Image (spheres, rainbow, N blue to C red):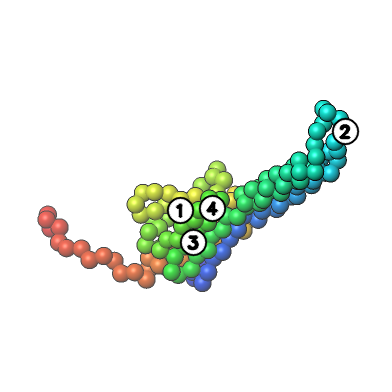
Amino acid sequence: MPAPSAAPARVSAVPRVLRVVCALLAVVVVAVMVVVALYTQPSSALNPFDVADRVAIGGVGVFVGAAILALGRSRVDADASGIRVRNVVGGRTLPWEAVRGVRFDRKAWWATLELSNGDAISVTALQAVDGERAARAVEGLRALLEADRAARPAPARGPLLWD
């Protein structure tokens, strides 16, 4: 993939395929639970469901559907000031000085930020199943990182003992 000539002003990405799959799955789960709630009638002592039980079944379906939708909430936003990563649980805002590199290995499911302190942060918003869209976002993040490095002066170094 050719390198972009200039860093973009802003890079934003969400996991498109994951969001569609989560939305469809959430709709199916909620629909099944609502149908079960509607068709569960108290008929005998072996089936003692009342209205509160049926409402609870529907409520559990809505709760599970919302939890499934939450799986697709990942997002990455970056500009010249830094990068903001929101994964399924939690998020982080980092200045570019804290980022050593942006990796997206060939067999990886999502991109990874390598930090200056040796840690790594998964960027689940940039997933391999999103194909070219994810690759463009990774290239944009790399361009922003390189632009920040070029704008920062190199740290001052004193003479070495063996010079």
x%, y% of residue 135? 57, 56
Picture quarter containing residue 57?
top right
User: How many angstroms separate mark 3 from mark 1 (CA)?
Assistant: 11 Å
The quadrant of the image that shows the N terminus is bottom right
118 left or right, relative to 49: left
Residue designated by label 4: 87
Q: Is residue 60 visible?
A: yes
58 lies above or below 156: above
Residue designated by label 3: 84
User: How many angstroms separate mark 4 from mark 2 (CA)?
Assistant: 46 Å
Q: What residue type is labelled 1?
A: Leu
| Mark 4 burial class by Cα count in 10 Å: few <14, some 14-19, many 20+ | many
Per the image, label 3 sits on a secondary structure element best described as: strand
Residue designated by label 2: 43
Q: Which amino acid does label 3 sit on?
A: Arg
Q: Which amino acid does label 4 sit on?
A: Asn
Residue designated by label 1: 113
Tell me which numbered mark, 4 or 2, is placed earlier along the sequence: 2
44 lies above or below 61: above
Q: Residue at x 70, y 44 (%)?
A: 60
Q: Nearer the viewer, residue 14 or 33?
A: 33
Q: Which residue is drawn at 29% across and 66% down?
A: 154
